[in-house]
Image (cartoon, grey):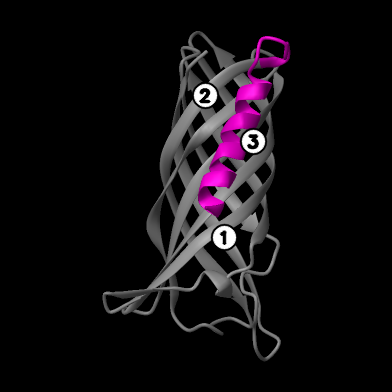
Amino acid sequence: MITRVTGVAVVTGLALLAGPETASAQALWFNGGINLSTIHTSPPESLGDVSGEVGVTAGASLTFHDAARLSYELRGQFSMRRVAFGPDITDTITYVEVPVVARYAFVRGEGMTIRALGGGSMGFRIAATESVVGDSSSVTDAYKPFEFAVVVGAQAEWKKRWVFEGRYLFGLSEVYEVTIGGMETSQRGFQILAGYRFR
């Protein structure tokens, strides 16, 4: 139920912003790709051997002042992140992410624009499962319901129709509801995405 309501809210918000009355919403994009996430701990190795597994990300975004050198993007996307703890345990955490970034075009050529990206992202945890040697169970309540991260990256736009980008998410908020021994945790990850301009 939470997943459905959150998804409807994101899609409705993007649709409203994309309406004809919003003059500054200049382009609507669909985006998808992969992510590689891990959990950073302090002190190091507090959770043992933690490594990132490949997950998927998909959503839609609006760009404002799309043709300008300095433009802005609002995105809504589902992101399924997978984190391994040693060889036998893998957690899969699904978020609705709402990144807001500024885009600066430092190269603008014939058919190609290259931009630097920077901003922030709010993540809303909607589900989490843990697989232990193939047996899965819910661990949703172990993860905090909200996450905030700084976003930096680069984007290449080809012929005003396709975009290819890489993003690094530097988590600033705690991952778990409960930690022990003063342990601090945050999520870190990369996203490699491709997008297509719908309008």
**Element under label 1?**
strand
Q: Give, as a three-letter code, the residue at label 1.
A: Arg
Query: In the image, which residues are magenta?
Result: 1-25
Q: Earlier in the sequence, mark 1 or mark 2?
A: 2
Residues packed near mark 1 inside 10 Å, few (<14), some (14 to 19) or many (20 plus): some
Residues packed near mark 2 inside 10 Å, few (<14), some (14 to 19) or many (20 plus): some
Residue 16: x percent and y percent? 66, 23
Q: Residue at x 49, y 73 (%)?
A: 139
Residue 5 covered by magenta stretch: yes
Disc 1 versus disc 2: nearer the observer: 2
- Residue 168's disc is none
Q: Return the residue at label 2.
A: 29
Cα separation, mark 3 vs mark 2, equals: 16 Å
Left or right: where 196 falls relative to 115: left
Residues packed near mark 3 inside 10 Å, few (<14), some (14 to 19) or many (20 plus): many
Q: Return the residue at label 1.
A: 188
Q: Give, as a three-letter code, the residue at label 2.
A: Trp
Q: Return the residue at label 3.
A: 117
Residue 134: x percent and y percent? 26, 75
Q: Residue at x 41, y 40 (%)?
A: 33
Q: Residue at x 54, y 12 (%)?
A: 109
